[in-house]
Image (cartoon, rainbow, N blue to C red):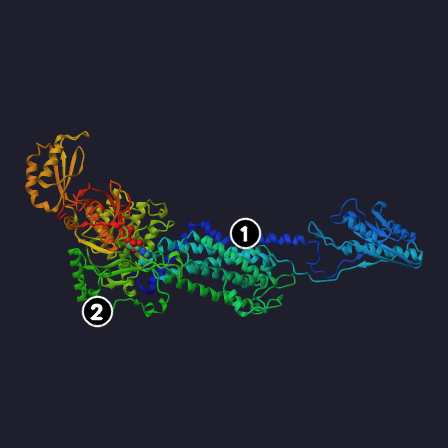
Amino acid sequence: MKLVSGFPLLIQQFTALFKKNLLLAWRNKWGTCVQLFSSFFFIFLIFCIQKALEARSASSTDYKSIEDPAPLVSPPIPPCEEKFFVKQPCYDFVWSGDGSSKIRNIVTAIMTNNPSRPIPETKVKSFRTSADVDEWLSNNPMTCPGALHFSEREATVISYGIQTNSTAVAKRKQYEERTFKFQIPLQIAAEREIVRSLIGVPNFSWDVSFKEFAHPARELYSAIKQVGPTFFLATAMFGFVFQMSSLIVEKELKLREAMTMMGLYDTAYWLSWLTWEGIMTLLSSLFIVLFGMMFMFDFFLHNNILVLYLVFFLFQLNMVGFAFMLSAFVSKASSSTTVGFTIFILGFLSQLVTTAGFPYGSGFSKTSRFLWSLFPPNLLAKALKILADATSTPQDRGISLSGITECGPNEFDCVITLSDIYKWLMATFVIWFVLAIYLDNIVPNASGVKKPVYYFLTPGYWIGIGGNKVKEGDNYSSAPPLDGSTPDDVDVLEEENVVKQQARDGAVLPNIAVQIRGLVRTYPGTRKGGCCCCGKKTAPYHAVKGLWVNFAKDQLFCLLGPNGAGKTTTISCLTGLAPVTGGDALIYGHSARSSVGMANIRKIIGVCPQFDILWSALTGQEHLQLFATIKGLPQSSIESVAKKSLAEVKLDEAARMRAGSYSGGMKRRLSVAIALIGDPKLVILDEPTTGMDPITRRHVWDIIEDAKKGRAIVLTTHSMEEADILSDRIGIMAKGKLRCIGTSIRLKSRFGSGFIANVSFSGSTNSVKTPHHEAVKLFFEHHLGVLPKEENSAFLTFVIPHDKEGLLTRFFAELQDRQHEFNIADIQLGLTTLEEVFLNIARQAELEAAITEGRLVTLTLTSGASFDIPVGTKYTVIPGTESPQYPRGFMVEVYWDQDESGKLCISGHAPETPVPPTGGPTNLHFPDPNHKKAS
Ligand SMILES: Nc1ncnc2c1ncn2[C@@H]1O[C@H](COP(=O)(O)OP(=O)(O)OP(=O)(O)O)[C@@H](O)[C@H]1O
């Protein structure tokens, strides 16, 4: 099947990833709705705040436009109870008149002639002097709204003064207007009655009317200007957190790496997220404007809709770019909420500062404005302020499209216009986006892999050839293993020589699928504490130390090894996930060190990684379709290929189930199906059957066996049975090096401890051993010198070393002759298991490492004495046991085992025996007597 490539593949991948984003959003309906419609909630809150503020100032004419104010004509003195917060009993007014009877009469007239309501005696209090009034007022606060002070200067001159409480008060959102409510009525009444008294005309009168100024409405407190920046920032934070966690989840679960291994273009990846988030931002900004108009805010009704829309769209897009950039530093999706919260708090605080005027005023430097504008919430706060100022009073007409290049109507210190803000938001978005891609490359990914900080300066990045590409004609054979040693094993050495010779000849035989030429992978040291420039740096770690091996076509090569042996690292180098440090790997002739080679390799490999790399919200079928599309299968065949693959791994019935609800075994099968999709020429299976039940495992083995035809398969597994059944060749790695290589039989015969003989007895149904057991044990011990390794009432199991191979024919012939005598039901002879080979190799590698590092361990004898011996010591002399009788002292044989982490540990020791006067074991160890420990 011809695969799509180049630009059409980029488009195909982009479409598939966009569809994946759409599906993920559709399946996370709650999250998507919050992202789109959260603005409704916040605009509703702003609406409520605005209404509360308007209600507070409803009684004031300040916020209303007054063109022809209503006159206040001869207002009466109001009852004191009408004063806000007055104490009972209260007085309508108090007065002083120096004891003048004329003045008393005037006051009486004031009380009697008060329009529409005569004032009773009880509501008026008289004092002699104004000082007495002051004293009383200060002792009885809030008991009287006003005081009159009269003074009879001459017979025709009476002067008076008025006192009112100047404290402004409001009650139930009504402001008390002191001048019009108390001062003017007292003034009119006092003047009227003084005049009547002086001219002697008791009903003399005149009309006095009072009017406030005609005035435009004052700027009303704008909720949008004050709380809008915070609330619209909060709206954007939902999208910010969702976007960040989507990117981080794909990084954390290694989904991104899986797609890269399948040949995903980075451009398609970024474009798909950018397009998706762009559409979400377009919609959510539109909803902000629509909801704002729905709630009838002048801000939304009077400013041009496109002007408003651009502010919200560009701001939210900017936050998306910001999220892209920050996601490079965060490795856990669960941290995205914390990051979002931190950004929100920082944004809230910096917006407060922005709303207060910093740094968008002529008194601040351009540099401070430049730096401040890098943080998107600040630009939003400034834009909202400009737009809110432009609609702060009913007579303001807002900002039109043509007005964005000018200063706002109510701006007095204008240093930035809306069009400047648009430009800033667009420019900073580009900065964040480019930085996001750059940081994505230079910050270590989930596998700890990163590019150098200057990667984009290398020509290889632009023309597609890796800067670290091995040059033509490189003499691979000269690359020594890292520790300078040659392999101990003859088969490994032979394989190495064959590969080296082929490398020297520059020929890759047609039957070779993969040729690994001195592959080295070193992980750079890291600084403790994660700090980039402080703390002590750990030494670089050589995970693969010069691997030379061929993987043949139509064969399955099984890579075995204990944890940390370097298997996954080798695979990562083959798939391009981990850059090769030294040597090279040619896959069907394409170098894993060149980016062009890697691009070609990715077209022909299928990988089943160690951990299930699946989106829990996508179904099995959607996974296969997505990966088939990424691989470049033609669109017309994708559905049928996906169906066929699902049927092959018996997942056709679960095709439409989400992968999150699959069992562990189903997930592994889906991963195997993904690896096999698109007919890859090399399939890499990293522990593919982990977690599968025996039935499913056998089924997957059948699939793998069938898949061998026409392709090479590399398998890593911890199941020796799996390796035994499936492999054509096996290589066992330990500590980054290949320790042995060959077919299963060859490894067993070379590295197993020999042959296993199983002897079963007839009629042994209970747990009691019969005398025949002892007879057979004696027979084996006498002829072959071996004791049983395992025994029970029905069986005896013996391990016969290889050196006894010559005796076996006669031995078993004789045993068969005496079968009835020994009551033997059956005799089985076989080679030792692969597991034993594996354990031996792992143990040997561990021993080598311990010797190289000079590791010591404390041996504690049964007598209680303890001293240090090198790890792996077989015989050791006990320090301080020399005596005239035993001049060379005593020694013990030490037994070794491996703990759960594979490290060698002492499992016991033999009884203490005197060291023979001459000779003794060749590897007898003499511990340093200074290291002797107290018993
Ligand atoms: N990113 C990394 N940075 C530093 N060291 C690493 C990194 N990845 C792996 N290693 C180290 O490299 C060594 C080989 O690891 P690798 O994953 O290849 O082992 P493995 O043989 O696949 O083991 P397993 O059977 O457990 O999967 C280990 O000691 C591991 O700690």
Q: Is residue 93 above or below residue 416?
A: above
- Direction from residue 102 to residue 614 in the image, left or right: left
Q: Which quarter of the figure is the C terminus placed in?
A: top left
Judge whether residue 560 can be spotted in this image: no
Picture coordinates of residue 401 (x, y %)?
56, 67
Q: Residues within 10 Å of mark 2 (few under 14, many from 20)?
A: few
**Going 18% across and 29% down the picture, which residue do you hit?**
768
* Element type at mark 1: helix
Picture coordinates of residue 141 (x, y %)?
76, 49
Alpha carbon distance from label 1 to label 2: 68 Å
Q: Amino acid at mark 1?
A: Phe
Query: Looking at the image, in which quadrant does ligand 1 appear?
Result: bottom left
Between 330 and 889, the residue placed more toward the observer is 889
Q: Amino acid at mark 2?
A: Gly
Q: Which mark sits nearer the N-terminus, 1 or 2? A: 1
Q: Circle 2 is placed at which residue position?
A: 473
Q: Circle 1 is placed at which residue position?
A: 41
